[in-house]
Amino acid sequence: MKFGQVEDPSQIDFTLPKDHPRTKEILKENKSKKFNVFIGCAKWNKTDLKGFYPKGTKDELSYYSTQFNSIELNATFYGMPSPEQVLTWKDKTPSDFKFFPKIPNTVSHFRRLLNITDVVTQFATSVLNFDEKLGMVFLQLHDNFKPKDYERLEKFVQDWPKEVPLAIELRNSEWFADEEVFNKTMDLFEKHHITNIIVDTAGRRDMLHMRLTTPTAFIRYVGANVDSDYTRLDDWVERIKIWEKEGLENLYFFVHQNIEKASPLLSAHFIEAINIEFKMNIHVPLMA
């Protein structure tokens, strides 16, 4: 994942910003005492995750799901999954595994949230076949989808099938630059229980808004293939510790890299730290 890539990461201030004031309020409203953690990569194919699979691995997803408890399913962005395909994926994974499928680009990039009822219905119908293994689906809007099209986003959120949990990633800087626009959009997400995705990548620090809209933190972390990737993850553990005390219910954390083969290594570091901090026993992925 090269989104937000910069030529010289050492020039970037990777300090996590302070939480948005509303984040603490959202977490304190949560009455659940559970804290669920799902950590994974964005892909399971051998081409990207070089060195991860033991020699002779016949089915990549089956092996991947013994090492991670979740996957950010980017494959569905490029093509509509059939119910049969979803059931095949589901049947290859353990009972506690979760899928986080991305909404097809037909919705977000080609039709740009217009005239999408048929596609959304088809997608929702398919992914509901994951049953208890469906974590949350997410919409990633195009970089050039701007607040001038707020009404499209509002209608999408209002019409979204409520039985399918949803997160949204806003990418254009105008969503974050205008406080009034940002607050209005976050209020919309709150009202409809939509999770606001946080992206931590070198070249787009504006997307690191630290504004939760539900008691779920959906974080897409993009490393830069440098040593600071690890200290950045340590900083996230410290922030999550605060959020968990304030009432965080779910942590969905997906690790990307400009060179994806390092993603399992970064994930292992993060999982080990989470296990220690929260006295959990999440499996630490092994490198072949």
Image (cartoon, rainbow, N blue to C red):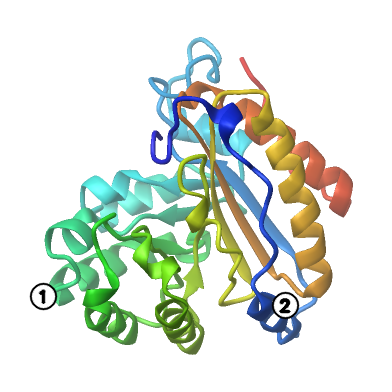
- The C terminus appears in which quarter of the rendering? top right
The image shows a total of numbered marks equal to: 2
Classed neighbour count for the residue bearing mark 1: other residues with Cα under 10 Å, few (<14), some (14–19), many (≥20): few
Q: Position of residue 31 (x, y in %)?
A: 75, 85
Image mark for residue 24: 2
Classed neighbour count for the residue bearing mark 2: other residues with Cα under 10 Å, few (<14), some (14–19), many (≥20): some
Front one among 179 and 257: 179
Compared across the picture, whether 23 is left or right of 239 comes to: left
N-terminal of the two: label 2 or label 1? 2
Q: Position of residue 37 (x, y in %)?
A: 69, 56
Residue appearing at x 40%, y 46% in the figure = 89
Compared across the picture, whether 131 is left or right of 24 comes to: left
Residue appearing at x 44%, y 76% in the figure = 182
Residue assigned mark 1: 115
Asked which quadrant contains residue 3, the reply is top left
- Residue type, mark 2 in image: Lys
Instruction: From this view, report whether residue 266 is shown above or below residue 222.
Output: above
Front one among 190 and 116: 190
Q: Position of residue 203 (x, y in %)?
A: 46, 41
